[in-house]
Amino acid sequence: MNNVSLLNSLLDDFNYGLAMPCLEAPAYTPAVDVVEHKDSYELVMDLPGMTQDDIDLSVKENTLTIASKQDPAAENKAGAEQKDENKDAGKYLIRERFNASFSRSFTLPRNADSQQISATFKNGVLYVTIPCKAELAERKIQISAA
């Protein structure tokens, strides 16, 4: 028995079977990899079970935000309505998979071209490409006599 199982067992005994919501519904933070290439950055985020329509991708100033469009309150309401309609649907004995809203923000590097960001979604994985701005070459400035 690990420490979490022991803690859950003790809490269940203490609460006489009443579940502690904070222990059953952990915060959802999708895994992200950020890769620096020669002329771009690539952000890869695992979003299993989602579609591209479930994701909101936005950029404001130098902050890229990725969030889900899912509304947990609406899901809970829909689940409750479905449960009322089908009382024989069964009850969960173990529930480790869940849908939760999330929001992740990333500060873009100074050389990122926020106007050219593109994204693709394939097999539950979001790929965001952030191109780098072309570096301005140093140029000599002519000094004129006054």
Image (cartoon, rainbow, N blue to C red):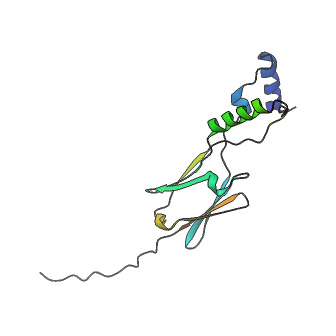
Picture quadrant where residue 71 is located: top right
Residue 111 visible to an observer of this rendering: no
Q: Considering depth in this image, is 42 or 145 the residue closer to the camera? A: 42
In the rendered image, residue 81, in percent from the top left (x then y), is placed at 71, 33
In the image, farthest residue toward the front: 85
Q: Is residue 14 above or below residue 29?
A: above
In the rendered image, residue 65, in percent from the top left (x then y), is placed at 54, 52
Question: Which quadrant: the C terminus?
Answer: bottom left
Q: Is residue 57 above or below residue 140?
A: above
Q: Considering depth in this image, is 2 or 77 the residue closer to the camera? A: 77
At 68% across and 55% down in the image, what residue appears? 51
In the rendered image, residue 27, in percent from the top left (x then y), is placed at 66, 39
In the rendered image, residue 3, in percent from the top left (x then y), is placed at 81, 31
At 76% across and 20% down in the image, what residue appears? 18
Q: On the picture, is 130 further left or further right than 3?
A: left
Residue 59 visible to an observer of this rendering: yes
At 49% across and 61% down in the image, what residue appears? 109
